Image (spheres, coloured by chain):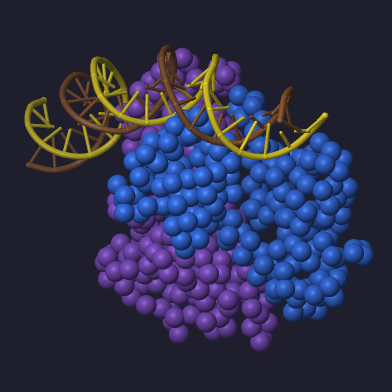
Chain colours: A purple, B blue, C yellow, D brown
DNA sequence: CTCCTGATGTTGTAATTACAACATAAATTT
DNA sequence: AAATTTATGTTGTAATTACAACATCAGGAG
């Protein structure tokens, strides 16, 4: 079915599996692949799904339509990433987002039920697949909780400090860089960019941290209230 | 080891398993149980964990310490609920929260690695356990995404409308009740209660919906923009 | 090097919110 | 039923934010 599993080997879902293992595995779980052209809908908001997407080629965009009709981009996924797993495993939950092919793409679909149902031959790779899947969802869970932690703060200042504290902890250092430019950081914090810049200036003047581009140095002695 | 599995049968983690199945299962995965007194720490923020907690008796509280030292309650779990799964499955992730026994409690700890590692006897119940676990984490994932969706709105009005839209969709109806009183709703939306009340009055006057206690009726024709 | 472009910082204003203080309504206790 | 407590609504004010408009800076192209 799948002749070249090299992409899959780079996917977190198949991490730890050899080429041979992956091929065996794909034979025992129900998969099919499909090509999408740019802009084509892969999963449509409102419908339930029972399969997970693995990006073999190209990239996809997760979008959401506001109740007032505005489209917003929630995430972008590239080759090797998986998507749809949260809805595929939650029975009957209707998709609240839409997945669209951002370019020419090829997607491998895996039936969610086949992931936890052991194949007749009880292949040992299956156990690793499940482990990977659990880790992926668990990790997403933590990332989502981090964002909620940040967004639950009511001021730009506290959101930013909360975000920086998490980054500092992740890096085990007072000095670190973040994967955002100002606009992206503002988007993550759900605040206005210029208001964020303004607040960052104030915080720097007050000695909370120093920042240059996306590199921060936290002065924790002053950062605590 | 566990003589009375009645609590476990009510737990979503063991849903679909009979008493017999559950007992068999518990023999093939590594478990141990422990009693906690009120206020005792079950999982401490900062340390990584490799086991999941299942509440056999009592209830627990998930708390978080702010960078300025303020404690806030993030969640409360009762008998049958599980907790810690996100961190237990994410290797090396340090807990960002603390779990505390809210009353006298008894917790069953399950080694996370044993959940996806098949036992020698390859018991068929194991498959169901994995299915349940995946569904639980996936469901939490969706709930977290819903909250982020709400919190990403920048005004009380839009947060509330976003929240109500989700509730309406879940109930497949323009008429529904929510599981919050005003203060709890304000806490969920991360806004001031009185400001929320104020905005709700305005929205009612403008004909977006009518509300009595925790029962809402949405007038969608006006609700759009 | 100069021009151009995109990213970032600054400022003023209108809108929104938090907060406090109080009013009213509903539920509970006695 | 009266008294008490709790939940909810209302209002004014100070603080914060969004937004727009513009200034400055850095990098790349010519």
Q: Residue at coordinates 78% horizontally, 41% vertically from top-left?
A: B102
Q: Residue at coordinates 84% horizontally, 73% vertically from top-left?
A: B19
Q: Which of B30 and A67 is in front in this view?
A: A67
Q: Residue at coordinates 65% horizontally, 25% vertically from top-left?
A: B69
Looking at the picture, does residue A202 appear above or below residue B185? above
Q: Which residue lies furthest to the bottom in this view?
A: A120
Q: Nearer the viewer, residue B3 or B41?
A: B3
For the C terminus of chain A, the image quarter is top right
Residue A175 visible, this angle:
no
- Indicate left or right for B79 with B176 as reference: right
Query: Number of callouts in the render?
Result: 0
- Indicate left or right for A194 with D12 as reference: left
For the N terminus of chain A, the image quarter is bottom left
Q: Residue at coordinates 39% horizontally, 68% vertically from top-left?
A: A43
Q: Which of B34 and A212 is in front in this view?
A: B34
Q: Position of residue B185 (x, y in %)?
A: 54, 41
Residue A99 visible, this angle:
yes
Residue C3 lies in quadrant: top left
Q: Where is residue A173 in the image (x, y as percent from the top left)?
A: 57, 32
Q: Position of residue B163 (x, y in %)?
A: 46, 48
Residue A25 lies in quadrant: bottom right
Looking at the picture, does residue A28 appear above or below residue A104? below
Looking at the picture, does residue B83 appear above or below residue A202? below
């Amino acid at each position: 079915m799948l002749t070249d599993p090299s992409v899959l080997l780079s996917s977190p879902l198949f991490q730890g599996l050899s080429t041979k293992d992956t091929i065996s595995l794909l034979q025992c779980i129900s998969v099919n692949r499909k090509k999408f052209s740019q802009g084509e809908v892969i999963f449509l908001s409102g419908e339930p799904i029972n399969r997970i997407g693995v990006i073999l080629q190209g990239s996809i965009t997760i979008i959401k339509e506001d109740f007032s009709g505005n489209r917003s981009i929630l995430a972008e996924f590239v080759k090797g990433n998986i998507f749809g797993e949260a809805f595929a495993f939650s029975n009957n939950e209707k998709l609240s987002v839409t997945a669209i092919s951002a370019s020419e793409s090829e997607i491998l679909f895996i039936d969610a039920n086949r992931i936890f149902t052991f194949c007749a031959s009880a292949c040992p790779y299956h156990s690793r697949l499940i482990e990977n899947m659990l880790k992926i969802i668990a990790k997403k869970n933590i990332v989502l909780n981090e964002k909620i932690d940040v967004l639950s703060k009511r001021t730009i200042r506290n959101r930013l400090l909360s975000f920086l504290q998490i980054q500092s902890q992740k890096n085990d250092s007072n000095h670190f860089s973040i994967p955002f430019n100002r606009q992206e950081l503002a988007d993550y914090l759900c605040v206005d960019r210029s208001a964020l810049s303004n607040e960052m200036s104030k915080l720097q003047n007050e000695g909370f941290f120093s920042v240059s581009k996306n590199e921060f140095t936290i002065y924790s002695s002053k950062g605590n209230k």
